[in-house]
Amino acid sequence: MMNRILITGATGFIGSALCHRLATGNKVIGVDIAGVTPSETLNIIWEQIDLTDFNSAATVCEKYSPDIVIHCAGI
């Protein structure tokens, strides 16, 4: 079963490691405030948003309907 996993802080140390580890067999949505250079070798969807903006966070959740959210954003 393929899960839709949304990971906040996806460009940080722990978040990026989780994105890469969970990308096999899952649909990973990496969310971060920092700009991201998408990797063509991994099946990761990248979204650049500010999690302190409720509307942006709600829009991403509505767009992808994640089964699991792993919060790794530090600030």
Image (spheres, helix red, strand yellow):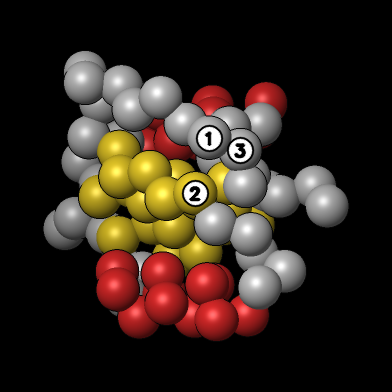
**Residue drawn 72% across the image and 69% down it:** 52
Q: Amino acid at mark 2?
A: Gln
Disc on res. 2:
none
Q: State yes or no: discs 3 and 2 in contact (Cβ < 8 Å).
A: yes
Report, in whole angstroms, how far the alpha carbon at label 3 lies from the one at label 2. Answer: 6 Å
Residue farthest toward the right in the current orientation of the protein: 75
Report, in whole angstroms, how far the alpha carbon at label 1 lies from the one at label 3. Answer: 4 Å
**Residue drawn 55% across the image and 81% down it:** 55
Is disc 2 placed on a helix, strand or loop? strand
Disc on res. 48:
2
The crowd level at tag 3 (other Cα within 10 Å; few <14, some 14-19, many 20+) is some
Disc on res. 34:
3
Q: Nearer the viewer, residue 71 or 46?
A: 46
Q: Nearer the viewer, residue 62 or 56?
A: 56
| Relative to 26, 22 lies left or right | right
Of the numbered discs 3 and 2, the one sitting upstream in the chain is: 3
Q: Is residue 67 visible?
A: no
User: Whole-percent x and y of residue 46?
Assistant: 38, 43
Report, in whole angstroms, how far the alpha carbon at label 2 lies from the one at label 1. Answer: 6 Å
Give the quadrant of residue 59: bottom left
Q: Is residue 46 above or below residue 36?
A: below
User: Whole-percent x and y of residue 14?
Assistant: 65, 32
Q: State yes or no: discs 2 and 1 in contact (Cβ < 8 Å).
A: yes
Q: Name the quarter where the N terminus is drawn.
A: bottom left
Mark count: 3
| Relative to 35, 64 lies left or right | left
Residue wearing tag 1: 35
